[in-house]
Image (tube, rainbow, N blue to C red):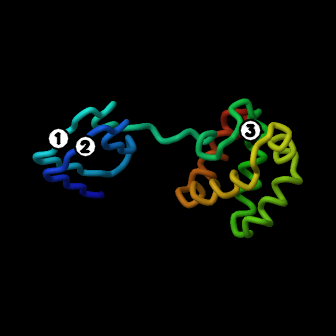
């Protein structure tokens, strides 16, 4: 658990002064701090959706999403250039390119969320959602 102690700090003129993931293992201790002219003081936020995290079009069909996730999973040890090439040549990649998506950015974002285990989790979730398991 992360322990964050804030003492005598002034938070002013921010959109959000402090933002913490709703499931984050954080112990927050604030003493003699002031919050002035912030839109929000302390926010427990939901994690970004998979679509947001990967910058995907929100109208991506579940079957294409599943294909994309499987490619990302299978190519995780390849370098970014090779992953981009493999994804671009796939049906999911062709669909994304037709929508104007930046496949390179998707690959780059995937590297970050893959470390957190989101890709594997998402494959399972989407497979169940479309009736594949």
- Left or right, 27 with reference to 22: left
Q: Which residue is mark 1?
A: 34
Residues packed near mark 1 inside 10 Å, few (<14), some (14 to 19) or many (20 plus): few
Distance of label 1 from label 3 (alpha carbons): 52 Å
Who comes first in sequence, dot 1 or dot 3? 1
Which image quadrant is residue 46 in? top left
Would you say 114 lies left or right of 13 here?
Answer: right
Residue 62 appears at what percent x and percent y? Answer: 74, 35
Q: Dot 3 corresponds to which residue?
A: 132
Quadrant for the N terminus, please: bottom left
Foreground tag (1 vs 3): 1
Residue at screen point 64% across, 46% down: 54
Q: Residue at x 79, y 59 (%)?
A: 84
Q: Nearer the viewer, residue 111 or 14?
A: 14
Q: Which residue is mark 2?
A: 11
Residue drawn at the location 72% of the way across and 33% of the way down: 130
- Callout 2 touching callout 1 (CB < 8 Å): yes
Q: Earlier in the sequence, mark 2 or mark 1?
A: 2
Which-is-in-front pick, marks 2 and 3?
Answer: 2
* Residue 81, placed above or below residue 73: below
Q: Nearer the viewer, residue 39 or 58?
A: 39
- Residue occupying image coordinates x 29% and y 51%: 26
Q: Nearer the viewer, residue 106 or 64?
A: 106
Cα separation, mark 2 vs mark 1, equals: 6 Å
Tag 1 secondary structure: strand
Marks counted in the figure total: 3
Quadrant for the C terminus, please: top right
Q: Secondary structure at mark 3?
A: loop
C-alpha span from label 2 to label 3: 49 Å
In the current view of this chain or complex, which residue is farthest to the left?
Answer: 32
Sequence order check: which comes first, mark 2 or mark 3?
Answer: 2
């Amino acid at each position: 658990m992360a322990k964050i102690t804030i003492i005598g700090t002034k938070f002013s003129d921010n959109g959000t002064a402090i933002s913490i993931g709703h499931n984050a293992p954080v112990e927050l201790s604030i003493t003699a701090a002031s919050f002035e002219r912030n839109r929000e003081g302390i926010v427990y936020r939901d994690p970004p959706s998979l679509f947001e995290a990967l910058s995907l079009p929100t109208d991506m069909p579940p079957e294409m999403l599943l294909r994309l996730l499987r490619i990302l999973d299978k190519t995780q040890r390849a370098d970014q250039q090779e992953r981009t090439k493999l994804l671009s040549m796939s049906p999911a990649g062709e669909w994304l390119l037709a929508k104007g998506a930046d496949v390179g950015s998707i690959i780059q974002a995937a590297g970050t969320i893959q470390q957190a285990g989101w890709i594997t989790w998402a494959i399972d979730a989407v497979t169940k959602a479309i009736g594949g398991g």
